[in-house]
Amino acid sequence: MKSTVASNGNDGFWKPADEANDETTGATAVFNFSSAPLAQQRMLLPIHKHKRQILYALENFGVVVIVGETACGKSTQIPHYLMSNGWCDNGFQIVCTQPRRIAAQTLAARVAKEVGRGSLGATVGYTVRFDDRTSEGSKIVYVTDGILLREATLSDPLLSRYSVVMVDEAHERNLNSDALLGLLKKIRRKRPGLRIIICSATIDAEAFLDFFAPKAGKPEKVLSKRRRRWDNVDGGRATTTSLPTKLNKGTIISVDGRQHSVDIFYLDKPSSNYLRSTVETALHICKISSKKSDGDILCFLPTGEDVDEAIRMAEEVVDSQEPHLAHDVVFLPLYSNLPFNLQARVFRVNGRRGDGGNFVKKKRIIFSTNIAETSVTVPGITHVIDSGLVKLPYFDPETGFDRLIVVPSSQASAKQRAGRAGRIQAGQCYRLYTESFFTDKMEISTPPEILRTNLSSFILTLKALGVDNILGFDVMDLPGVDALSHGLESLYALGAIDDDTNMTVLGMDMSSFPTEPRVSRMLLESLREECSTEVAGIAGALQVRSLFLTMRGSSAGRQQRQLDYDNAISEFADSSGDHVTYVNVLSELDDRRLDREECTLKFLDYVALKRVVEVRDQLLRHLKKFGRIRSLGMATVEERRESILKSLTSGFFFNVAKLHNDGKYYTIRGTNHILVTPSSSSIFHTYGSHAEYIIFCETHDGVRGGIELRAVSAIDPRWLRELAPHYWH
């Protein structure tokens, strides 16, 4: 088979995948149901023909593993089937967990529309961090994995109000989902009637089934004899009897049927610039797409920064080289830190009024991170461009840093991405790498988070659940000794556990916050420093990429824009660095109630600020449970700076660097002295004084190598021994 797509720049020609590749085979059902009535759409989904099989399996088995291809309908239809067949009777609810908040929100909205009993939050609702749309009458609830874990930690150890727990997208294997699977296994010993559904598009079904229902003769892990929190619970619906024989077993159901075939194309040789290749390929597809029925384009990139840069690059190319596309194409971003109202734009049809007043649909080019891989289904996609890259968190035991590293995606991820092109008609997937790279270099699947990330939050969650012996808790993969040791050391230094690794009162307070342990400790310290409003704002600012807008536009007038930008930022910049600057920006926003236009004039990101305020207010409502909320008010600049930075130091005292004689900063944790550089995007880099000691919240790999720091501030080294004497002795 010869190449049918023209070359992209100098990166080579597209080469179709081998015809024997099973990814190009079509599925059985070929329907375009995008505009059909809801009831008809539901019947046309591949999951529909398995409805009776699923309901029968759930009646007769305690655990059901469902393997279904992308867009088969498992996430929306299974909870609906269960509610319609009595699983919500007697006050019970059905809960479906998702790895990302956007998935929980969009799925709940879809199912609420299908059920048709009131608005979102009535019969069907969702709960994600900092957003709860449920009511007492909710029957189906979509939540993130972490929210369900917090519910078990804070209020209901046996999850007694749920008849069925559905763990969706289980293949992602994040820390929360792994902890949740272990917790559910333990809960079923007390509640044998609880049904568990594990489902995903790519999954090692046998491994999950063996975890919950080991085959005869296969020993389970030896359980700790210590009493657990749920052993002392008066369960009501719970029972301490052993599992009935039929409920002690599980089964696997395979759901076939991606709606349409997807042709896979590879590069003849590796791309030298994946961003440029992505943009060029997307615009090339637009130019050769002559049919108005052609669908939209979904481009997978590793980071949110890449998404924004790709959109900027695409807009510049269209303006300067392809002006005829300007009225027919719209570029949309999609990544996790984007506010929900902006994420939701990818689910709407974009268009314009033609000359005759008729509606003309615009072709959408959506640049997304892996959030669109499995968590959400973007409608109308017929072309996928896969960069073959993903940004994943890794814990580096040598430096003690959490690192976000761009790495090649896995074969399983590549197949998931390609599947997004076959929803409404036969589609095409363009992979920006060679076929030999796919077969020989890519991992089969992405390593689970428990094997590669900082375990402090994971351990704190287990401790809050009453797990005394961490190694005795059932998880699918045992973490490494270095990661466990570092997690325990971190929690001990924060005061969350004592010498015997038992949880302290402070640790229990920290575990109740929907934040990582360092941020929780910082928030609690702010009560003592009487600056809770300011510190909660900093915690909110750490949830977004930046409070400031990125300069865009052509080179013409760039110098003047830079001067305007510098003048605007200098109004807020504090010489200590980023954190007090965040507080200054939020104070200006609160005092003057800046609108979108005023924020733009000051180079402030209005959408990001709204998100920060939302998070801040949620955290303050929770913080009220532990003390009186105060703000610094009339304090002097120095008093204000000291209170804020001391609160910050109480949580992030691990992350300290010292200025050496060569004029560079080196970390001083233990015996490792690692060269670090404040990021050029940080306020400290431009406006900060050259302090001897600095503290930082985030690290990332620099463009030119090395480790760069974000959210950086100067501190007084005496605070280290005052706030963490056991660590900085």
Image (spheres, rainbow, N blue to C red):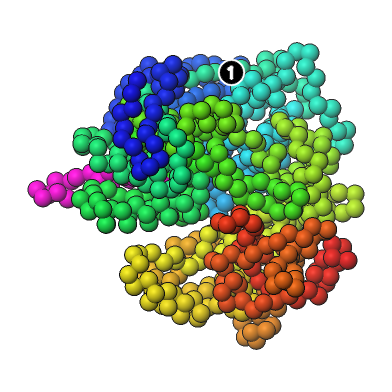
Name the foreground residue: 652 vs 509: 652
- Seen in the picture, residue 679 relative to 430 is either above or below; the reply is below
Please, which residue is most extreme toward the left here?
A: 356
| Residue drawn at point x = 87 percent, y = 63 percent | 726
Q: Where, by quadrant of the figure, is residue 635 drawn?
A: bottom right
- Is residue 366 shown in magenta? yes
Name the foreground residue: 562 vs 445: 562
**What residue range appears in magenta?**
347-367
| Left or right, residue 115 beside residue 53 | left
- Seen in the picture, residue 228 relative to 439 is either above or below; the reply is below
Q: Name the residue under label 1.
A: 252
| Residue drawn at point x = 64 percent, y = 64 percent | 677
Name the foreground residue: 17 vs 291: 17
| Left or right, residue 254 beside residue 691 | left
| Residue drawn at point x = 77 percent, y = 44 percent | 483
Q: Position of residue 38 (x, y in %)?
A: 33, 32
Label 1 neighbourhood size at 10 Å, few (<14), some (14-19), many (20+)? some
Name the foreground residue: 210 vs 386: 386
Q: Position of residue 524 (x, y in %)?
A: 72, 65
- Seen in the picture, residue 358 relative to 670 is either above or below; the reply is above
Q: Where is residue 723 in the image (x, y as percent from the top left)?
A: 80, 69
| Left or right, residue 426 beside residue 109 | left
Q: What residue type is labelled 1?
A: Ile
Q: Where, by quadrant of the figure, is residue 579 drawn?
A: bottom right
Q: Can residue 356 be seen in this view?
A: yes
| Residue drawn at point x = 71 percent, y = 54 percent | 401
